[in-house]
Image (cartoon, rainbow, N blue to C red):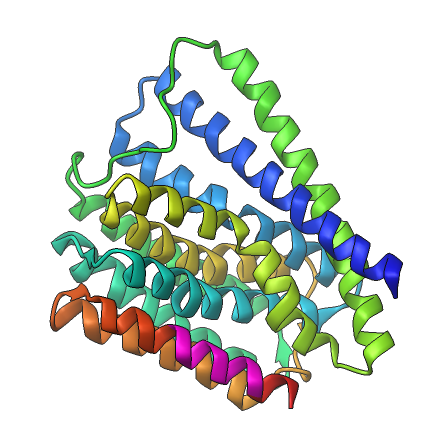
Amino acid sequence: MLLDLIAVFGGCVFLYIGGNTLLDSAVRIGRSLHWSDAITGLVVVSLGTSAPELFVSTGSALQGFGDIAAGNVVGSNTVNIALVLGLGALLYPLPIDAILRTTQFPLMLLATVLASYLLADGHFTRGEAILLFAVVAAGLAYTFYRLPQSAIEVTMAEQGNSSVGKNALHLAMGVAGLIIGAELLIVGGVGLSRNFGISEAVIALTVTALGTSLPEIAATVMAISRKQGQLAVGNVLGSNVLNIGLVLGVAGTIAPFSTQGLDSFSLGSMLAFALFATMLAFKPGHYPRWSGAILLIAYLVYLTYLFQ
């Protein structure tokens, strides 16, 4: 059991370092290639923080751990709203940009509803994975069409004049860290589930989900410390959308898997948190501190139910 705990902790560390390295280097590459901040931020910030989920879920699907593959996405999306967004709102009331309200929130809710429906029958097929990917891709394309270039500001780090080659090396190092971290987290998570008699789905919904959400937590805390609330909201939204469309889409296309370990409570909770976040986006149109407190309390209730 000790080795499993060490593996989980080591996996989280590698995922955190690898995710941040990938994120920073990818943003620098975008600047070096003279991409606009809107394109770099919308693609890279969300993609970078979703990379751990991509590696963990794809690796789990390939190794036959379908409950971990699906539970990781469901748990991560729940963590992103309940814990990451809740913590952010509690620390600093979060504003919501109008373009996110009219494009990303409806897309996140649509993707969440569709994913919940497709995962509920206990099987996730290749056709369902392709459908999710296509829906999210179409939604993001529409967002790009509507998005002004000034809508997203990348605040992760100043980019300097470093070369594309150097940043590409850092990018590869970040990917390597994610691969190592994902494998450690899978091995440790499976080991813990067997030692404690807890299902792989519950481990994925909690321990693995928290581990793969570390980049989102780090990005949100960084954004809040710089009073960049819209970046924090955009990161959570983009990450949740990509977790469903890209992570589930890629994992299910490569290796269709069983989701029988996921119960209706877990899927319903993910959907309820997404609905609550979307409702607040339209009225009052921002996330006040009281909404952060509600989200954090609801997450504690969610965890209590999973482990009872």
229 on left or right of 67: left
Instruction: Please report the residue visible at 49 percent of the width from the left and 26 percent of the height from the top.
Output: 25
Q: Which image quarter is the C terminus in?
A: bottom right
Q: Nearer the viewer, residue 251 or 297?
A: 297
Comparing 293 with 57, the one in front is 293
Q: Is residue 78 left or right of residue 101?
A: right
Q: Position of residue 87 (x, y in %)?
A: 37, 62
Residue 212, above or below 29:
below
For this rendering, which residue is in front, 46 or 141? 46
| Magenta residues (range) | 296-304
Question: Is 211 inside the magenta-drawn segment?
Answer: no
- Residue 183: x and y in percent read 76, 51
Locate residue 61, reporting x and y percent.
71, 62
Question: Would you say residue 117 is visible in this rendering?
Answer: no
Q: How many marks?
A: 0
Q: At 59% across and 44% down in the image, what residue appears?
A: 16
Which residue is located at x 37 percent, y 56 percent?
236
Rendering quarter of residue 304: bottom right
Does the rendering let one see residue 301? yes
Q: Which quadrant of the rendered structure holds the N terminus?
A: bottom right
Residue located 24% across and 49% down the image: 229
In the rendering, at what x and y percent does residue 126 appear?
61, 66
Q: Answer above or below: position of 153 versus 307.
A: above
Where residue 64 sits, quadrant-wise, is bottom right
Magenta: main secondary structure: helix
